[in-house]
Image: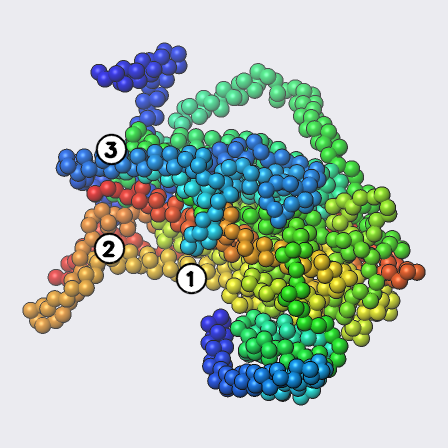
């Protein structure tokens, strides 16, 4: 700021009294205090050494299966605790010693260093601009527009090949998001256990986590589970509030929904028997079982897809058909509300 | 000359013979750093990063980033013979069959939480004191970049063990990817090498977690520190501290000892946490499978605000022309975070545009003297805290006997209502603090001592402030609003005119302040007393 | 909210504690007397012993339960019918102290049982006599320590229970203030009874979908989780990252900032 220009204001304002006088510490004036500080620093360094010795000793001598009781923590693994506290002490006290040393025994007079404005002088700046212009002119970038344009094309395109090379990171999704392992006639089996289920196996108020029975010889993958998981719930048939089609997908009070949340794909398995609500523990979307998993709270925008149920000749529960809509979170190509 | 000095001399000579670095080294060893506790916050982040590198290298010796299924037969019996991925099994191995392995895992995870927390408080310090102003805008941007990458890096690390909790997190990340219009399902299939969860995601994020991102971190941190070094540190205003100087302690020996010592202290405290407090007990979560879930599934705190936003999002989806757009995912998962981070990055430039201030600043602001900025910061902070609270609504509900639905509605409404209120209150607090400064400079400090005047009147003794204190409280500039250019009709709504009006309005709001007392006022007051 | 509800509970407890104690004492003396008088004639048919038990249960029911559940356990406006819930449900609800309810809050919580084992058995016999239902579980028949498989129990727990009760059986939130309680310290027979009767918000887990052997495994896993030591240090409630984040922002950053303040302070 130009002080002459603002003379009037400057006079009226309070003045900077400058850096306060340096006050001596006890350790600056009293040799005994300085010696005491030295001993303190040394003691702190030695504490760190003790910590290291303790760490090594506990690594060698403490059985890693030994537990000791401590208040607050409870039964604690002795080796983990001793290694950790030893390591913590060996590090912490080096730091404390160094800082204590700096504070008490190293010079504590504050120093002033000058700063300079970063802006270069006007001549330097003009000089710089002139140089850049001159050199650019020497390359002929301004005049030779053919080079300029072709270079633009080349540089613009060169980034594409690495992008293309990433294409094989994975297959194309095709119709995968819309398909599951459920087909007409697929038996429902318990997860875990893989046992088929009869309607009589479920009392009113019961739930079962189920998966589709797989043809013999095929192994269940996590990718299957991620789309196939289903929750089976039995309520009193008169409690349903469904249209005729959805009611025909139930069997004697038993209703099945995809367990993969229509919001972000967590397992919606939290069934409240009293209210007949399903709750997703991830983001608390709440679905009403009696109304075909209609969303009654939370961020999910769509009901959970319902699986149509039927019985096979042996009386086991089967899917009447596959899911009629994609299960799980939404995606761009999804074509149903 | 002592022997050690001789050795040091000959080493220095050897180096200088080959580099000519003596003058440069001398200059930098006496470099001055101002001392203040709030200048150590960034150092906490830096040291946590070093701790993360060290403990992380240790973990890589045993960790197997593979999603191949194995049958566990390690020493943690509750999971004996359970099928799980190799990465989960090797994390169990580190936790139970490598001595000190669990300690290192816990140090690594605590250090990660401290790293991000320290970045956030460092950012708040820089924001509230105006340290981001010219010439430090670039360092502000690098800082925002580091925070963003830190969140990503943390999330990837949390995902590596492939336990039930982290797998749920990955599942949610996949849903966000899948929700991106047009390319979402392709992105997801490319990232996961097919259907979720697949067998390639963890090996892929592993290399990003241990090589790619740490490399970028190292580069960015280096530039961040070199800029601090080159531009010299900012300092708080006070007697003797000017825009043109820097007052503090020399690098050698004081700052070396303090900063070096502080590294060991940060490491020691992190190791202490790793020793006494359990973090991410993956053996309790179990291996990931998409059909399972635990109550209270949350991300680490630095993602918690985003999870909170996702939880409170309205159930909105657009279904049109055979396509679906999930606003309930895109809004809280990408759009709002994008706006927040873009706004944060743009702030230095917005403030400079509003104030029209194009000068260099090396003296920090006292937050009260910039009420609008301080209020804006407090407002943003309240937004984040409300979002974060909703991210833990289930735990809050069970521990304080509230309902998740109640907390959800409270935060849904609070997210819009509370920040503006916080803005207004903070601004008022700033202005009253300015008023209090003015009072105390002009009338001195109330001592609480009463004296009786000869007339029998009681007066409280006011102690005059020291000149140093008076200077500290009055040194700041009085903001001057940018006047509206009077050219043209006020009703002609050209874009330029709108821009001018907007700028002058905001500049006016920014300039709200209590006039700083002056020496002349103080003198006048004194003569009035007598 | 917490303190006020507690105070209320306490108040009610005090108000009812006296009369309930008197009734309990009389009943205990009464039943002891009847058992003592029954001893000489041990040949009495089992059926009549059973009917005595049912009779006693009915008396307790009329005094303690009928105001809400109706004189014939047919249910009322604020309480469900108990016809057909079986002895298992009674043993669970009364044995864990959930019934009688202390106050009309969202859901009955576990507390010190008001009725002793004999009275609970009598109540259970009475309710079981109304209509057939699952029988109370005899703790001696639950050989979970011998027959359970912890690892299998863990997998079953994570699929069927963890979504409400949390990964470490610490409990969790349900909608509208309801909650799944912690399973720490719950008697094995009560865990078993809860699975077959589905108390309150909890669904039933039929023996066909989760076999009795599998249920024993679940119990064994819960007991293992309960006795699991603090392997990595303080457990922080085993509720996941929320408490970890809280600790970092309080203790972690608190310590670090405190040291930073000390570090930047001038020595005197």
Q: Using the numbered discs, state the Cα–Cα distance from disc 3 to disc 1 in whole angstroms.
A: 45 Å
| Location of the C terminus of chain B (image quadrant) | bottom left
Query: Dot 2 surroundings within 10 Å: few (below 14), some, or many (20 or more)?
Result: many
The image shows residue B431, relative to residue A113, as above or below, that is below
Query: Dot 3 surroundings within 10 Å: few (below 14), some, or many (20 or more)?
Result: some
Q: Nearer the viewer, mark 3 or mark 2?
A: 3
| Location of the N terminus of chain B (image quadrant) | top left
Q: Nearer the viewer, mark 3 or mark 1?
A: 3
Q: What residue did someone put label 3 on?
A: A106
Q: Using the numbered discs, state the Cα–Cα distance from disc 2 to disc 1 in whole angstroms.
A: 24 Å
Q: What residue did someone put label 2 on?
A: B441
Mark 2 or mark 1, which has the lower sequence index? 1
- Residue visible at 71% across and 80% down in the picture: C46
- Residue visible at 61% across and 22% down in the picture: A142
Q: What residue did someone put label 1 on?
A: B425
Query: Dot 1 surroundings within 10 Å: few (below 14), some, or many (20 or more)?
Result: some
Q: Are marks 3 and 2 in contact (CB under 8 Å)?
A: no
Q: Nearer the viewer, residue A316 or B65?
A: A316
What secondary structure is marked by label 3? loop
């Amino acid at each position: 700021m130009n002080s002459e220009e603002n003379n009037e204001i400057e006079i009226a304002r309070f003045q900077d009294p400058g850096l306060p006088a340096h006050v001596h510490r006890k350790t600056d004036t009293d040799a005994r205090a300085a010696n005491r500080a030295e001993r303190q620093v040394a003691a702190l360094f030695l504490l760190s050494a003790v910590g290291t010795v303790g760490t090594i000793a506990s690594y060698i001598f403490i059985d890693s299966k030994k537990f000791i009781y401590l208040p607050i923590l409870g039964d604690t693994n002795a080796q983990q605790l001793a290694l950790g506290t030893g390591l913590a002490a060996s590090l912490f006290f080096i730091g404390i010693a160094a800082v204590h040393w700096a504070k008490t025994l190293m010079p504590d007079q504050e120093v002033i260093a000058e700063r300079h404005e970063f802006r270069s002088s006007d001549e330097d700046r003009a000089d710089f601009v002139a140089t850049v212009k001159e050199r650019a002119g020497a390359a002929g970038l301004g005049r030779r527009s053919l080079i300029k344009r072709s270079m633009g094309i080349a540089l613009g395109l060169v980034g594409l090949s690495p992008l293309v090379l990433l294409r094989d990171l994975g297959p194309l999704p095709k119709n995968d998001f819309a398909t599951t392992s459920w087909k007409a006639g697929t038996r429902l089996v318990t997860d875990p256990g893989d046992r088929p289920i009869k309607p009589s196996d479920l009392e009113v108020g019961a739930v079962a986590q189920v998966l589709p029975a797989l043809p013999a010889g095929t192994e269940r993958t996590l990718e299957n589970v991620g789309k196939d998981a289903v929750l089976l719930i039995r309520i009193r048939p008169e409690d349903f509030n469904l249209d005729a089609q959805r009611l025909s997908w139930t069997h004697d009070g038993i209703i099945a929904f995809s367990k993969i949340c229509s919001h972000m794909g967590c397992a919606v398995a939290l069934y409240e028997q009293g209210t007949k609500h399903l709750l997703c523990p991830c983001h608390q979307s709440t679905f009403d079982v009696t109304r075909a998993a209609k969303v009654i709270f939370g961020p999910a925008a769509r009901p959970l897809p319902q699986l149509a149920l039927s019985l096979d000749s042996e009386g086991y529960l089967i899917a009447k058909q596959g899911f009629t809509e994609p299960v799980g979170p939404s995606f761009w190509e999804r074509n149903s509300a | 000359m002592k022997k050690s000095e001789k050795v040091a001399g000959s080493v220095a000579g050897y180096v200088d013979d080959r580099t000519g670095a003596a003058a440069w080294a001398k200059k930098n060893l006496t470099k001055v750093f101002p001392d203040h506790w709030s200048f150590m916050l960034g150092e906490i982040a830096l040291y946590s990063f070093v701790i993360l590198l060290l403990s992380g290298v240790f973990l890589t010796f045993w960790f197997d980033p593979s999603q191949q299924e194995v049958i566990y037969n390690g020493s943690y019996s509750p999971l004996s013979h359970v099928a799980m991925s190799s990465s989960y099994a090797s994390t169990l191995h580190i936790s139970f069959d490598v001595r000190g392995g669990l300690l290192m895992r816990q140090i690594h995870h605590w250090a990660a939480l401290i790293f991000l927390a320290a970045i956030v408080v460092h950012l708040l310090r820089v924001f509230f004191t105006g340290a981001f102003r010219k010439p430090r805008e670039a360092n502000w941007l690098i800082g925002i970049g580091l925070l963003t990458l830190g969140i990503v890096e943390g999330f990837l690390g949390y995902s590596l063990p492939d336990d039930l909790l982290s797998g749920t997190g990955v599942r949610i990340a996949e849903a966000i990817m899948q929700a991106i219009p047009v390319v979402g399902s392709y992105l997801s299939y490319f990232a996961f090498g097919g259907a979720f969860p697949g067998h390639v995601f963890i090996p892929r994020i592993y290399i990003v977690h241990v090589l790619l991102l740490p490399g970028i971190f190292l580069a960015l941190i280096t530039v961040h520190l070199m800029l601090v070094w080159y531009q010299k540190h900012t300092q708080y205003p006070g007697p003797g501290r000017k825009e043109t100087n820097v007052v503090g302690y020399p690098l050698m020996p004081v700052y070396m000892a303090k900063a070096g010592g502080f590294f060991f202290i940060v490491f020691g405290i992190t190791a202490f946490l790793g020793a006494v407090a359990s973090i991410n007990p993956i053996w309790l979560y179990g291996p990931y499978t998409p059909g399972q879930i635990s109550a209270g599934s949350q991300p680490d705190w630095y993602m918690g605000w985003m999870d909170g936003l996702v939880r409170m999002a309205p159930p909105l989806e657009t279904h049109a022309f055979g396509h679906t757009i999930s606003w309930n995912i895109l809004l809280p998962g990408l759009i709002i975070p994008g706006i927040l981070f873009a706004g944060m990055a743009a702030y230095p430039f917005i403030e400079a545009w509003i104030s029209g201030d194009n000068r260099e600043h090396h003296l920090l602001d006292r937050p009260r003297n910039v009420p609008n900025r301080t209020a804006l910061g407090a407002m943003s902070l309240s937004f984040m805290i409300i979002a974060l609270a909703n991210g833990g609504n289930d735990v809050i509900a069970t521990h304080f006997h509230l309902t998740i639905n109640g907390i959800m509605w409270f935060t849904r409404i609070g997210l819009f209502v509370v920040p503006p209120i916080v803005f207004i209150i903070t601004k008022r607090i700033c202005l009253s603090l300015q008023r209090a400064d003015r009072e105390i400079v002009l009338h001195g400090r109330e001592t609480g001592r009463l004296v009786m005047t000869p007339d029998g009147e009681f007066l409280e003794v006011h102690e005059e402030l020291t000149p140093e204190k008076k200077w500290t409280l009055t040194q700041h500039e009085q903001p001057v609003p940018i006047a509206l250019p009077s050219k043209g009709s006020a009703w002609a709504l050209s874009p330029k005119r709108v821009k001018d009006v907007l700028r002058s309005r905001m500049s006016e709001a920014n300039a709200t302040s209590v006039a700083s007392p002056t020496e002349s006022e103080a003198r006048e007051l004194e003569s009035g007393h007598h | 909210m917490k303190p006020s509800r507690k105070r209320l509970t306490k108040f009610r407890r005090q108000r009812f504690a006296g009369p309930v104690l008197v009734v309990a004492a009389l009943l205990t003396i009464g039943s002891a007397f009847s058992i003592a008088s029954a001893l000489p004639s041990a040949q009495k048919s089992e059926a009549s012993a059973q009917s005595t038990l049912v009779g006693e249960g009915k008396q307790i029911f009329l005094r303690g339960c009928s105001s809400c559940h109706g004189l014939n356990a047919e249910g009322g406006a604020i309480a469900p019918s108990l016809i057909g819930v079986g002895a298992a449900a009674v043993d669970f609800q009364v044995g864990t102290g959930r019934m009688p309810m202390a106050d009309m809050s969202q859901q009955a919580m576990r507390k010190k049982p008001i009725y002793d084992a004999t009275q609970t058995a009598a109540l259970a016999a009475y309710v079981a006599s109304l209509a057939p239902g699952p029988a109370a579980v005899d703790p001696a028949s639950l050989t979970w320590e011998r027959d359970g498989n912890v690892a299998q129990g863990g997998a079953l727990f994570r699929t069927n229970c963890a979504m409400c009760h949390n990964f470490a059986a610490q409990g969790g939130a349900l909608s509208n203030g309801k909650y799944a309680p912690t399973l720490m310290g719950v008697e094995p027979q009560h865990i078993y009874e809860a699975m077959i009767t589905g108390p309150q918000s909890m669904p039933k887990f039929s023996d066909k979908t989760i076999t009795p052997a599998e249920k024993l495994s679940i119990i064994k896993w819960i007991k293992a989780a309960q006795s699991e030591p603090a392997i990595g240090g303080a457990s922080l409630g085993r509720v996941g990252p929320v408490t970890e984040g809280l600790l970092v922002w309080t203790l972690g950053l608190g310590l670090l900032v405190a040291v930073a303040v000390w570090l930047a302070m001038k020595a005197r």
